[in-house]
Image: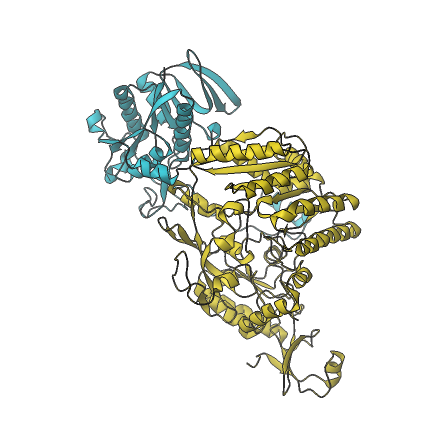
Chain colours: A cyan, B yellow
Amino acid sequence: MALKVLVGCKRVIDYAVKIRIKPDKLGVVTEGVKHSMNPFDEIAVEEAMRMKERKLVNEIIVVSCGPAQAMETIRTALAMGADRGIHVEIPLDQMDTFQPLHVSKVLAKLAEKEKVDIVMLGKLAIDDDSNQTAQMTASLLDWPQGVFASKIDKTDAGLEIIREVDGGLETIRTTLPAVLSADLRLNEPRYATLPNIMKAKKKKVDKMTPADLGVDMAPRIQIVSVEDPPVREAGQTVADVDDLVAKLKEKGFSSA
Amino acid sequence: AVMRGVPQLLSRARLVRAGFSASEPVLAVQAGILQPDKFTQTFVQIRGLKSSKVIYQAPLTAVDIADSGKQLKQELEAIVGPGNVSSGESVVLQHGQDEGPHPGKSPDIVVFPSSTGEVSEVCKICTRHNVPIIPYGTGTGLEGGISAVEGGVCVNVSKNMNKILQIHQEDFSAVVQPGISREMLNQEMRADGLWFPVDPGADASVCGMCATGASGTNAVRYGTMKENCLNLEVVLADGRIIHTAGIGSRPKKSSAGYNLTSLFLGSEGTLGIITSATICLHAIPESVAAAVVGFPTVQNAVDTVVMTLQCSVPMARMELLDEVQMKACNEYSGLSYPETPHLFLEFHGSESEVESQTETVRDIAADNEGGEFQWAVQQEDRTKLWTARHRAYYADIALRPGCRSLTTDVCVPVSALPDLVTATKADIAENGLIGPMVGHVGDGNFHTMLLFDPADPEEFRKCKEVANKMARSAIALGGTCTGEHGVGQGKMALLEEQFGKDGIDVMRQIKGALDPQQLMNPGKVFSRN
């Protein structure tokens, strides 16, 4: 009994880009800046693909919420092997107030609509570091969650998941359907090859809006300000050990 | 051209001591001295009526030295900005030492230009001051190529010139500045189905790879830097900027003019500074499978390689690791293979192509007493394997903590490989050395990491002897004294042996034409005369 997986992908600023704060201090510069798929979402897509190759999964639907450019991210996931896509269109000017709670509501609605068995997400997005969407989606659906997964296996009753937690590794078992989120060591994603990129152009991508899914877009969080970390001050060279000790005492790091 | 500087008439006695006839007219010119307490060089140019000869002479008296050095620094700062000129101790130290065993010499000044125009102006200044110019990329070379043997100005072109200028997906080419390393380029293109396959162990600057004619584990199928470079933008010692295949040219082939691209590829910074490279990209293969197979002897492994090539199997990677190397990799990278010679193989192609390739190679390996093929197909398993291979150098030094390695790099026609490898192993054993062997046997290219205690000159001498013997055998077998690392300082004598005097003289003539003041990376590749 093969499973159906809904994988969420987010288009984020590429991890290698040097981030610059906007002059209005309410966000970062995104125009003209290289974007790519959130690295944890790549891992999520890859895991879904490996489950498909192991014949545990027979359909992978990839969904991305965003403006027109989100299509690039969907096409990348399709090139990695996903079967079809869903683009939930959010106009560019609404992206600033589009928050994890909205994404969770969209995913929950889609999960029910498409009757999927697993919702697979990245554990967090590298632009906002929220780490909320998987958990809130599970709560909205009242499904079990296996987040920070570093290994996923199918059992007769459902899934066995090894999670990376602060103290080490935790093994849990859940029933299906379930919401999972991918951690770094789950796998190393494959690269999209040119033939697959070409095939991906022909795969089906449905378009819809949050309103079509009955999701209200009112923001619950207001960004007050975004600032650079403090500039690193120049260090002080010390002449010798005595000088160092004197300076440490002076700054209060060492008692007399 | 008259050399500028502080002219001084040398006494006849001094000239005779330096080996000149007392009757030759002399004009001695003092070169730009950079630091009052440290002489870099002094040129003595003899303009006789019939000939002019440039020789070296021990430093003369320090006349106007302090001013000359300050002047140079000021002029450089005016071009690149005061924050981009440094003669700080740690900065110059870092810029004179690469990853090889030869202790490097620090330059006097390091500059960090931000554009080709700035590089050109820097060269003009250095030419005017008669000061050596040493191009610097990532400092990951192995043959002392960046060592400032005569002091001078190190031009670090990677720090501020770090853009990918163009990627042409449909044409499979890209134009990059010196600050772009091969891994940076591949990360940028990872979602586009393209990659740049030349992979020396280090994450080297692509332009630096052009300067050394670099190669890597994928060369057997995808070629070396020489086959993957379409055009170079080069700044010459006098500041002229040229494009070796034409301005903005990037066709796959051309019959226009002399092949200057070939001339500069592998010139190790002795002819000019590479400020951008147009390189070939390839499609990421549809299907990739890696395998590890053990053999009872190195001979068995190498025979397998030779036969595989003769069957025209388009192998992507064929790497030999001998039993010593396997032990080192096991310990360093947490692998657990038997300590016997192994081949690390990789197959690229469509799924059906990979399947048929592996079948052929499995049969050949079995015929040569090869063991079971152990497969790595998932991305992380293949990454683990090739990372272990790329870390071979560090794994070897870890075999004997505190030691350094003299890494050899010979390349012979593939048919000569089995004999050379076996003879070398015997030589290493005879000399009581530890010399793990690893190599791109698919190209006939392999490396021995001869370990030595830096405090034991006798051991280093033995290593040098074994290395030289290997290189000379390689030359005698129709090969080359360096497959991919370059000549740098360490193999200059071997180059003479490989090319003969006339061959080297032609190189000298070319260098003399492009760099008459002998400022570009002096002391490398071949001697002045």
Horizontal side of A85 relative to B267 (left or right) equals left
Q: Position of residue B487 (x, y in %)?
A: 62, 58
Q: Position of residue B112 (x, y in %)?
A: 50, 60
Q: Please tell me which residue is depicted at 70% across the width and 51% down the height of the picture.
A: B470
Horizontal side of B412 relative to B280 (left or right) equals right
Q: Please tell me which residue is depicted at 32% across the width and 36% down the height of the picture.
A: A199
Of residues B448 and B372, the one nearer the viewer is B372
Q: Is residue A229 visible?
A: no
Q: Please tell me which residue is depicted at 54% across the width and 66% down the height of the picture.
A: B271
Q: Quadrant of residue B277?
A: bottom left
Residue B170 vs A186, above or below: the answer is below
Q: Quadrant of the C terminus of chain B?
A: bottom right
Q: Is residue A127 visible?
A: yes
Of residues B76 and B21, the one nearer the viewer is B21
Of residues B82 and A90, the one nearer the viewer is A90
Q: Position of residue A163 (x, y in %)?
A: 47, 22
Residue B413 vs B434, above or below: the answer is below
Q: Quadrant of residue B244?
A: bottom left
- Furthest toward the top, the residue is A157
Q: Quadrant of the N terminus of chain B?
A: bottom right
